[in-house]
Amino acid sequence: MATPDPRDARIAELERLLSAALARIEQQEARIAQQEARIAELEARLRSTSRNSSKPPSSDPPGTPPRKSEPTGRKPGGQPGHKGRKRELMPPDKVTQVVAVPAPERCTGCTGPLLRLESTPPARIHQVVELPRIVPEVRQYELHAGWCADCNAWRCAPLPAGVPEGNFGPRLTGLIALCTGRLRLSKRLVQELLEDVLGVELALGSVSNLEQWVSQALAASVSEARAYVQTQPAVHQDETGWWQKHARAWLWVASTTTVAVFLIVKSRGKAVAQTMLGQGFRGTLISDRWCAYNWVHALKRQVCWAHLVREFEGLVERGGEAKRLGARLLAEVFVLFEWWHLARDGLLKRATFQRKMRPLMREVERLLAEAAQVCPKPVAGTAREILKLKEALWTFVYTEGVEPTNNLAERDLRHAVIWRKTSFGTQSEDGSRFVERILTAVMSLRKQERNVLDALTASLEAHLHGAPAPSLLPGT
């Protein structure tokens, strides 16, 4: 029997160790690849801002650089040939006092005597607008009483019709609501403003009480505005976070060019979107890609291209294939907006605009399909999600009155977002009702260029008299 060669055993041992080492190396390489992908994903999250994702600008940390724009080579300010603007003189019927200033005796240049000629040029008009000292009007009602022998009691006269039970009139109450609901002043600052400027003292709790009076006066008008929006051919919708008594809630808006309605609820789901638009909504919805809007058929939706631009910019910052495809998508979107602006302004016929858009539409969808195939998992997932709504990408091309972005709703929400940051939301259901109603009134009235204080005063006066509430709809 042959003696085993010890070298064979050594070789077998070395082969076993080599196989084990190769297996460990393969495992470690797979682990490293997973960690590199995880690191890339976390770095992308750290770089994620409102410029390169669907995150709202309010979520950007301090120091986030503004959106970059291409240099134009022009100096800041008015450009050559621009017609300057200056303050126009008030008409004579608005002037409360005229002060005639005689010509000087001597020239202000050489100190020589000035001559009085018959052909004197017209006087130079200089107007100064000043605020007079405001003295509040206090109307005192003396309610006389009579003795009732049957009841054995004194009976006072009731307040005349239209006189509030409280101590503050409709216009002052409307001003308080304007200060909190539009100017975003805290209740304590409103208290200081009234005392220092108007000479009116009121308790801090009275501000909340008067807000509720305004809320009740606006209830019917806001309901009418909500029904009006549901019948419009194109509606922009969006939502943002809110806080109600330290609990998470959401502030929703449905906007048209003339009316915007708001709603605060503790949900961001489909049911709220349906409540805002109505179950039988027949118009076109312009929104972001939030899933709560998926109940609207894609052919009756327009996905916001401003959000998509930020998504594509995020692709560019990821590098690799995502950067290449993101850059090509951004180039197509640049052309898209150029043509859209020309068509919107009447410089490009609608039929021509549609014809020029067809190859662009095909190229964008092709690039998204390629991104879904060759890009890393997060990018590919985003591309596939966009492609699921590809019919909703192009509604603005074929439907008159539909815009390619949801900027209208986002602009209407911006004021509320700043208000939320300074007030930390609302503390009750009644407070939330005031916020949504005053926002609806203020935004709708401003869209129609109507005086907000006059409209709030009229609503409160109608509420006092039991009359129908003034409408927030256009042309009323």
Image (cartoon, helix red, strand yellow):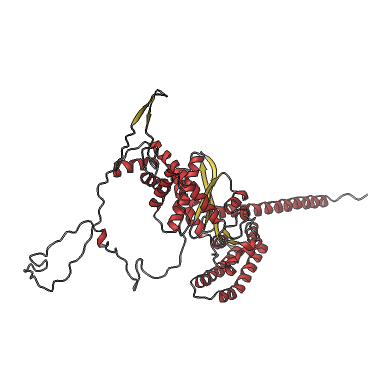
Q: Which residue is outermost to the top?
A: 152
Q: Is residue 394 left or right of residue 109?
A: right
Along the viewing direction, whichever of 345 and 384 lies nearer the viewer: 345
Residue 396 x, y percent position in the rendering: 57, 66
Q: Which residue is outermost to the left?
A: 113
Q: Which residue is outermost to the right?
A: 1
Residue 49 vs 392, above or below: the answer is above
| Visible residue check, residue 18 | yes
Identity of the residue drawn at 33% across and 42% down: 194
Identity of the residue drawn at 43% across and 68% down: 71
User: Within the image, what quadrant is residue 127 found in?
Assistant: bottom left
Along the viewing direction, whichever of 68 and 14 lies nearer the viewer: 68
Identity of the residue drawn at 25% across and 53% down: 130
Q: Which residue is outermost to the front?
A: 150
| Visible residue check, residue 63 | no
Residue 318 vs 436, above or below: the answer is below
User: Within the image, what quadrant is residue 319 found in?
Assistant: bottom right
Residue 8 x, y percent position in the rendering: 83, 52
Residue 24 x, y percent position in the rendering: 71, 50
Quadrant location, the C terminus? bottom left
Along the viewing direction, whichever of 69 and 92 lies nearer the viewer: 92
So how many labels did they put on this image? 0
Residue 99 x, y percent position in the rendering: 17, 59
